[in-house]
Image (spheres, rainbow, N blue to C red):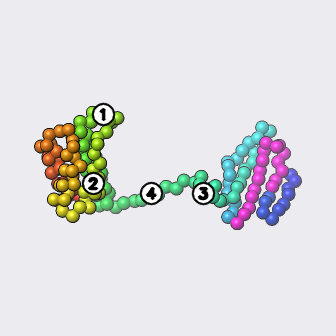
Amino acid sequence: MQGKRDAANYSVKPHDRNDVREVSQGSQGLTRQSATQQSASGHSGVGFRLQGEEYQEERKKYLTAKYGNQQMKLIRKRLSVEFWIDEQLKRLYNVQDDTETYDCDLDLDEILDLPDNEQRFQFIWNQVCSAPTSEDEILAFVHELLQKADSL
């Protein structure tokens, strides 16, 4: 094999034109571009490329957090209240299946941010008063939601 040496690039001339092996070295080090590749003649090679912005864009990062038992219990409780709100709003707005939606944007965070139950009651009532069900059902929903919000 013949090789051409440069301060920044090292190239190895392969036996076959389809079997390309290239190594580049830069300030960020070497990274492997692909797994071993085989050409038509059976020769194999490994390609490398520089780490850079392209490499960072390709690489996906995931963050996994581990919560304690008490924190997980609170998260589950909050999620159960969120799902309960969704189910009740579907019932109040007579939504039959998942393709339909209701015209109400009730956010649990906004409710919890309000300082007292009077303001919470007024906020929830203003959001759901347009529901096509009876006022008694709406009132029962508001009271039950206030109880659930107080438990969070």
Which span of residues is magenta-colored?
11-27
Mark 2 vs mark 4, foreground winner is 2
In this image, 1 relative to 61: left or right? right
Gap in Å between the C-alphas at discs 3 and 4? 19 Å
Gap in Å between the C-alphas at discs 2 and 4? 25 Å
Q: Compared to 13, does 52 lie above or below?
A: below
Q: Which mark is residue 56?
A: 3
- Which mark is first along the chain, 4 or 3? 3
Front in this rendered view, residue 82 or 106? 106
- Which mark is first along the chain, 4 or 2? 4
Amino acid carrying mark 2 in the image = Leu
Counting from the top left corner in percent of width and height, residue 4 is at: 85, 57
Front in this rendered view, residue 3 or 77? 77
Within the image, what quadrant is residue 7 found in? Answer: bottom right
Q: Are marks 1 and 3 in contact (CB under 8 Å)?
A: no
Amino acid carrying mark 1 in the image = Asp
Counting from the top left corner in percent of width and height, residue 46 is at: 72, 50
Amino acid carrying mark 3 in the image = Gln
Within the image, what quadrant is residue 119 found in? Answer: bottom left
Q: Which mark is residue 64?
A: 4
Q: Which residue is mark 2?
A: 108
Gap in Å between the C-alphas at discs 2 and 3? 37 Å
Mark 1 vs mark 4, foreground winner is 1
